[in-house]
Image: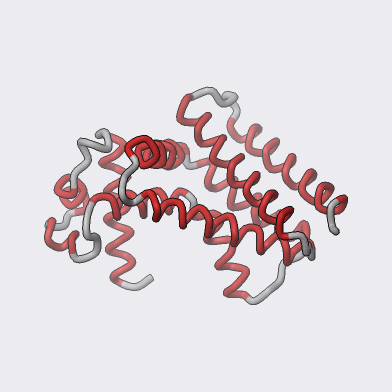
């Protein structure tokens, strides 16, 4: 990781810590800089405003899909079927286990939607990219030609993970989180291949 990326990650981590203690409105660039051990001027060297920091905080909570796509592209290996699903299971488990980040993801997303912030377009483009990349992976892994099915399956998976985040934020998940995650992963690893097998055309 480059020095610039390390500094940005330090700012993101500091923002997460501030958001655990304060509301979005109370979270300021000054508070984030202080938590990161930086001056506000130094922070502005990496981010133009608070919205940009909040976007990267939210994007990090969706990192499992970005990481999955990057791994496949970097290694230039076309993962097939269950091998891809196994990697998805691993990354989904990591994401769902980060309860605080899940809550922040929902908090930031709802704030952008409800208040119709200018950065909303950036959030929309990011989600579309996540769905497209996940759909492309499914297409390669299962040799699916039907773009509609690829996109639908990808959208359902991303929506399901976000749904778990909402339930985590509300505190309505079963007490045994690990068992629930295992059930979630088993459902998708068993149902996706079966669905795609029946809808290959």
Which residue sits at x=22%, y=40%?
27
Q: Quadrant of residue 22?
A: top left
In the rendered structure, the answer to whether residue 118 lies left or right of residue 27 reads: right
- Quarter of the picture holding the N terminus: bottom left
Of the pair 14 and 198, the residue shown nearer to us: 198
Examine the image and state in which quarter residue 106 appears: top left
Vertical position of residue 179 compared to residue 123: above or below? above
Residue at 61 percent of width and 40 percent of height: 160
Q: Position of residue 30 (x, y in %)?
A: 14, 48
Q: Is residue 116 above or below residue 63?
A: above
Q: How many marks?
A: 0
Q: Nearer the viewer, residue 81 or 120?
A: 120
**Relative to the observer, which residue lies in front, 179 or 71?**
71
Residue 159 percent coordinates (x, y): 59, 42
Residue 177 relative to residue 170: left or right? right
- Asked if 28 appears above or below 175 in the picture, the reply is below
Position in image of residue 140 (x %, y %):
73, 66
Residue at (37, 35) in percent of width and height: 114
User: How has the structure been colored for display?
Assistant: secondary structure
- The quadrant of the image that shows the C terminus is bottom right
- For residue 190, which quarter of the picture? top right
Above-or-below relation of 18 to 37: above
State the residue in front, 132 or 72: 132
Q: Position of residue 168 (x, y in %)?
A: 50, 31
């Amino acid at each position: 990781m480059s020095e610039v990326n390390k500094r940005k990650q330090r700012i993101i981590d500091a923002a997460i810590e501030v958001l655990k203690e304060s509301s979005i409105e109370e979270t300021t660039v000054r508070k984030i800089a202080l938590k990161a051990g930086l001056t506000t001027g130094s922070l502005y060297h990496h981010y133009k405003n608070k919205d940009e920091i909040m976007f990267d905080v939210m994007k990090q909570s969706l990192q499992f899909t970005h990481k999955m796509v990057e791994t496949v592209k970097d290694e230039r290996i076309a993962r097939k079927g269950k091998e891809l699903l196994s990697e998805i299971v691993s990354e989904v488990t990591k994401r769902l286990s980060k309860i605080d980040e899940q809550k922040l993801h929902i908090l930031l997303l709802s704030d952008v939607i409800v208040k119709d912030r200018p950065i909303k377009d950036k959030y929309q483009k990011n989600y579309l990219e996540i769905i497209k990349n996940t759909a492309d992976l499914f297409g390669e892994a299962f040799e699916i030609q039907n773009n509609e099915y690829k996109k639908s399956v990808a959208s359902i998976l991303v929506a399901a993970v976000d749904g778990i985040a909402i339930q985590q934020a509300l505190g309505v998940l079963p007490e045994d989180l690990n068992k629930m995650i295992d059930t979630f992963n088993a459902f998708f690893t068993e149902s996706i291949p079966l669905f795609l097998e029946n809808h290959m055309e």
